[in-house]
Amino acid sequence: MSTEGNTPMNPQTHDDAGISPEIAALHLEDRPDGPGAAMMISAGLAIFALGFLTVLAEASKGANTWLGTWQWGQGVGALAGKTTIASLVYFGSLALLWVIWRNKEVNLKTAFYVGLGLGILGAVGTYPTFFQMFAA
Amino acid sequence: MELSSRESWAVIHGLVLGALFLLAFGGALAGLWSLRPGLVTTRGVQERVTRLKVGLGAMAAIAWATVITGSWIVYPWYRVKLAGAKFDTCQGLELPSSVCSPRDFLLSNVSGETERWHEFGMEWKEHVAWGAPFLATSAFLLMLYYGPRVMARPWLRTAIIVMLVGAFAAAAVGGVFGAFINKVAPIS
């Protein structure tokens, strides 16, 4: 994914006020797209993790048992591990990518398509007809 | 009519939080769809963007509350194994009971062909619905970060709408199957 530092040598990369005169009066400073890319990719990563863990829990009794240890005695079963880990992936990747890309210009379209692809794969992984094919 | 504690939590999870999220979707979609140059004044942009930030933030919070109450409070009551491997204590029942959980009841097929409600409906719902908070939170953060700039970037606005529609679809699967399953095998 191409990234470009938003340095004083390259201070303005978007012409928002030129495209939309309504917001010119708001005098908004330009913002790099790195954090936006982080938001898009982290959602896709979390859904992918959820789908992957759903398939893994079906394919491996050991993994299913391990994911069940995340339930803290609440009776949630392996769903506790799948969803807690997916949530940690979401917030962890969001924070990490945000910090790494906070001053970078990242191609938002590429980030969106990466997130979309990961999200679709993850959604397929949560579909019962699919993940039950891997039943141990 | 008196609701038990379990029934109250099922109502809070599905009928209050889940329904609120699904209803809020229409407003958020309409607000984003018409956030275009030439349609809103400068003052209107500020009002619209503030409303979208508050609305999307509320949707994200509601999505988290819905999946957390569903998975950690209601779901354990649904899935607890009370009836043994052959579901003996479910025989002759028309609804789940203290000796036959909703999951046991559906898998036992004592009230028609109900197994698929668990094998497909519940299995899909319990997983895919968790996509909603991830997507709704990212949509909210994008709106918070870019604010009025979204108006000048049709592609970014479309990306946020796609994420919001994805969150709605995930929540709708959860909501629809939740309603049907609670009709066939209610939590009580």
Image: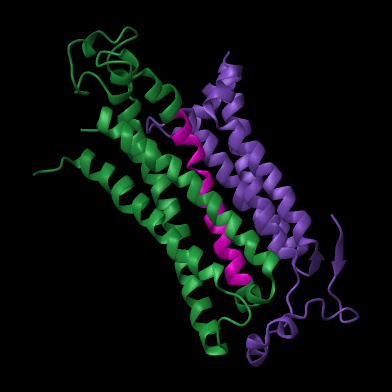
Q: Name the residue at the left extreme.
A: B1
How far across and down, in percent of the image, does residue B23 sit? 38, 58
Q: Name the residue at the bottom extreme.
A: A25
Left or right side of B62 for A127: right
Quarter of the picture containing the N terminus of chain A is bottom right
- Residue that appears at 26% across and 46% down: B11
User: Is B142 covered by the magenta stretch?
Assistant: yes
User: Eyeballing the image, is A104 above or below A117?
Assistant: below
How far across and down, in percent of the image, does residue B6 sit? 23, 38
Looking at the rendering, the stretch of residues picked out in magenta corresponds to: B123-145
User: Eyeballing the image, is A41 above or below B111?
Assistant: below
- Chain shown purple: that is A
- Residue that appears at 37% across and 50% down: B18
- Residue B70 appears in which quarter of the rendering? top left
- Residue that appears at 61% across and 61% down: B160
| Front in this rendered view, residue B6 or B132 | B132
User: Eyeballing the image, is A14 above or below B59?
Assistant: below
| Front in this rendered view, residue A15 or B127 | A15
- Residue B117 appears in which quarter of the rendering? top left
- Chain shown green: that is B
Does the magenta stretch mainly form a helix, a strand or a loop?
helix
Left or right side of B79 for A94: right
How far across and down, in percent of the image, does residue B183 sit? 26, 33
How far across and down, in percent of the image, does residue B49 sit? 53, 77
User: Is B124 covered by the magenta stretch?
Assistant: yes
